[in-house]
């Protein structure tokens, strides 16, 4: 997957490692320009354009200026499980420990197949497994954001669906030529030579 580097000045350092992913809708057009504009005070680690092009705006080791608004009393169970607190008990902004992914999309639009394909490929490359416990939406952390549960479910389905390998034909003269072994939970049948 080719990820195009388009740095945004809207980030800061963080002491946290990334442990999950938060997805968002941009709710606008010219998202790349907006997320790179110093006056916007907004950014994301990744932007998924409608055609599937992926832009990296902020390095994963930095905090993207996204998901700044949180409503702790409205956190979903998912948010409560992954949210981090400071030693003083206040919540840490999710951009510190979650990779922030913006999908270019107006409020009435759905994610495109190209966006799903790109997200699946990119998410599989992260140094942690993206799963139901660490893939969240901004709405998990506050009440006034778009509901992206269908999109989250589709991404998880694509990430964890296994494409079975095409079976290979094994021709034997008799059953005594069959060798059976198990490797990594798979049964492998070969012909004894």
Image (cartoon, rainbow, N blue to C red):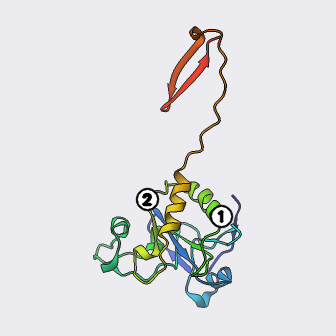
The residue tagged with tag 1: helix, strand or loop? helix
Give the mark nearest the N terminus, 2 or 1: 1
Counting from the top left corner in percent of width and height, residue 77 is at 33, 67
Q: Cα distance, mark 2 to mark 1?
A: 21 Å
Q: Residue at x 33, y 73 (%)?
A: 86
Residue placed most toward the observer, 147 or 15: 147
Counting from the top left corner in percent of width and height, residue 2 is at 71, 61
Q: Which residue is mark 2?
A: 132
> Could you tell whether 193 is left or right of 41 in the image?
right
Q: Which residue is mark 1?
A: 113
Q: Residue at x 46, y 75 (%)?
A: 138
The residue tagged with tag 2: helix, strand or loop? loop
Q: Quadrant of residue 35?
A: bottom right
Q: Quadrant of residue 122?
A: bottom right
Q: Quadrant of residue 123?
A: bottom right
Residue at the farthest bottom position:
39
The N terminus: image quadrant: bottom right
Residue placed most toward the observer, 46 or 167: 167
């Amino acid at each position: 997957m080719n990820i195009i580097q388009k740095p945004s000045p809207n980030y800061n350092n963080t002491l946290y490692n990334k442990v999950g992913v938060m997805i968002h809708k941009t709710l606008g057009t010219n998202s790349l320009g907006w997320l790179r504009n110093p006056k916007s005070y907004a950014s994301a680690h990744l932007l998924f354009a409608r055609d599937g092009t992926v832009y990296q705006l902020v390095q994963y080791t930095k905090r993207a200026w996204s998901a700044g608004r949180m409503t702790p009393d409205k956190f979903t169970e998912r948010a409560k499980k992954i949210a981090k607190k400071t030693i003083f008990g206040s919540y840490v902004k999710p951009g510190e420990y979650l990779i922030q992914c913006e999908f270019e999309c107006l409020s009435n639009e759905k994610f495109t197949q190209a966006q799903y394909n790109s997200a699946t490929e990119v998410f599989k490359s992260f140094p942690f497994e993206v799963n139901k416990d660490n893939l969240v939406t901004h709405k998990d952390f506050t009440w006034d954001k778009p509901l992206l549960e269908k999109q989250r479910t589709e991404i998880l389905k694509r990430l964890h669906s296994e494409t079975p390998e095409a079976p290979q034909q094994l021709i034997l003269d008799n059953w005594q030529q069959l060798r059976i072994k198990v490797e990594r939970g798979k049964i492998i049948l070969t012909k004894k030579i």
